[in-house]
Amino acid sequence: MIRMRRPNFSTVMLVLGLLFLYLPMFVLVVYSFNASKLVTVWAGFSTQWYGELFRDQQILSAVWTSLRIAFFAASMAVCLGTVAAFVMTRFGHFRGKTALSSMVTAPLVMPEVITGLSLLLLFVQMAQITGWPADRGMATIWIAHTTFCSAYVAVVVAARLREVDHSIEEAAMDLGSPPLKTFFSITLPIITPALAAGWLLAFTLSLDDLVIASFVSGPGANTLPMVVFSSVRMGVSPKINALATLIILTVSLATLLAWFFMRRNETKRKAALQEV
Amino acid sequence: MKLSRSSALLKRLQLGRRAVIAFPLVWLTLFFLLPFALVLKISLSEAAIAIPPYGPLLEYVDQTLHVFLNLGNYLFLLSDSLYIAAYWGSVKTAFIATLACLLLGYPMAYAMARAPARWQLLLLLLVMLPSWTSFLIRVYAWMGILSNSGLINNLLIGVGLIDSPLRMMNTQFAVTIGIVYAYLPFMVLPLYAHLTRMDNSLLEAAADLGSRKLNTFIKVTLPLSTGGIVAGSMLVFIPAVGEFVIPELLGGPDTLMIGKVLWEEFFLNRDWPVASALAMVMLLLLLVPIVWFHRYQSREFQE
C-alpha cells in the first residue's frame, strides 16, 4: 500500500519539541549580529560584539581557567567512573556495593546547591584540620567537578560494559591472562568509545557548572560561567550573545563530527556482517 | 609447594580486587558522603562572627566535654513563613515543570523510537545537543524572549494583538518554561532508551489479537516504559526543586524557590548554619524521590 501516511500525533510533537528546543538558540545567534546595544531592537548587521568579546580580558582568562579545570576534571572522572562502573558490573557481590551504587547514582540528581554547600564545608573543615586547602580555587573546583562528573561517566561506561560479551574476557582469563592484563588488552579497547563519550560529557558538564564552582571557588579563580552569570544578572548583553553563538557553533560542529564517525562505523559494521 | 604458590597468587588477586574497589569507594565517601555529615553538623551549630562563621559543637571547658546541639536553626525555619513558602513554591513549580516535560517528552521519545533506524541517531543527537551547550546561556535566551521589550511582546504589539506588553518575565510562567526548556533533554533520553529496548513482537501480538492502537498503548507500551518515566521524571524533578539559576534570572519576588533562598542565606547573609539547615530539610524532602530514582537506576548496573 503506497500512500502518504497522515502525520501522527507523536511525530507532530517531535517536530514541535525540536522547534521549542532550537528557536531560542536561533534567536540568540541572530541577535549576536545586531548593531544595536539593545538586544531587542534590530539595527542592522554587525560583527562588532565579536570584536568586543575578544578584547574582554576577563572573559578570555575565564575561558582559559574553565578549559583547564574541565580537561583535568574530565580525565580524572573517566578514571574514577570507569573503575566504579567495572567494579559494579563485573565484581559480583562485595561489601559496600550498595553504598557504592548509591554514591554513583545520587550525584546525577542531587541539587547543585546542596552539593556545592556540602563540599565547601568539607574544604573549610579540611583546611582547619590539615592546613589544606589554605586557598580555595582551581584545585578545589577540580575535586568537586571530578566527583560529580565521575557519576555520569560511570553510567555511560556501565551501559557499554553490560552490552559487551563476557565470554571474551572469560576466555582470556581461562587461557591464563591475569585480570589486570585482561582488562587492559581486552576490556579497555572494547569500551574505548564509551570512555570517549564519557570524557566529552564530563568535559561539557564541568565547563557548564556555575553553582558548585561558585561555592567551592576562592577569590583567585573565576570560571567562565561565573563571569557570564555576573554579566547576565545585569540584563541582556550582546557580547554574551556573541559568546553563546561561538559555544553553540563549537558544540554543533563536534556533534556533527561525532555523528559522521558513528554512522561510518555503523556502515562498516554492516558491511563486515554481510561479508561473513 | 604448588598449593602454597597458588594460594599466594589468590591472596594477591584478593588484594588487587580490594584495591580496585577501594579507589572509587574511598573517593566518593570522602568527597560525597562525608560532606553531608558536615552539613548536618554545621546545621546544629550557632552562627558566629568568625572565620568560618559558626560556633563549635564540642568544647572542652573545666575538664568536662560540653556538647552544643543547637536546634534553633530548624525551629527558625519553621517559625518564618518565608521558608515554608519557598519549599512549597519549589515543590509545586518542579512538579508542574516535570509534568509538562513528561507530556511533551513522551510523544517525542515515542516518535524517535518509531523512526526509521538510520534517523534515530541523528534525532537523539538533535535532542541532546542543546544540553551540551550551556545551561546558563539557554536560560539567558529566554530573558530576551520574554521581557517587556522582548521578542514575543514586540511581535504581538507589531501585529496589533495587544497594546501594552504582557508581563511574562519575573513570573511563575517564566520560571516554569525555563525549567521545562532546560531539563527536557533529560526527560527524553531515558524514555527513548526504554522505548527502543521494547520488544516489537509484543505490539504485533496485541495487534494480531485484535487490540486497538490506543488500547495497546495503554496496556502494553505504557507499563513497559515505567522505568523510563520514573527515571526521566526524577532527573527533572529533583534538581528542579533545588534550582537556583532559573528563579534567579527568570523569576521575580513572587516566585520563591528554596535553592535561591539557600544561596542568599549563604552568600548575602553569610549565615552558614541556617543555609545548612535549609539544605538538610531539602535533602529530607527529596529522600524518597532520590531512593526511588536509585532503585530504577541500579537495575541498569545489574547483570
Image (cartoon, rainbow, N blue to C red):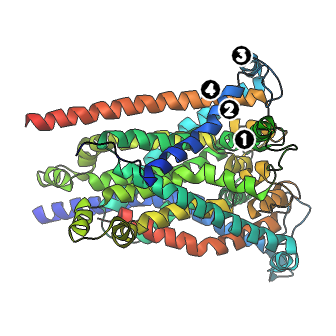
Spatial CA span between label 4 and label 2 = 11 Å
Q: Earlier in the sequence, mark 3 or mark 4?
A: 3
Height in image: A10 above or below A270? below
Q: Which residue is mark 1?
A: B140
Spatial CA span between label 2 and label 3 = 14 Å
Q: Earlier in the sequence, mark 2 or mark 3?
A: 2
Residue at 86% x, 70% y: name it: B82
A206 or A45: nearer the viewer: A45
Question: Amino acid under label 3?
Answer: Thr
Output the chain of dot 1: B
Spatial CA span between label 1 and label 3 = 20 Å
Question: Amino acid under label 4?
Answer: Leu
B169 or B45: nearer the viewer: B169
Badges 3 and 4, same chain: yes
Question: Amino acid under label 1?
Answer: Tyr
Q: Which residue is mark 4?
A: A246
Dot 3 alpha-carbon crowd within 10 angstroms: few under 14, some 14 to 19, many 20 or more: few
Q: Nearer the viewer, mark 4 or mark 1?
A: 1
Q: Which residue is mark 2?
A: A28
Output the chain of dot 2: A
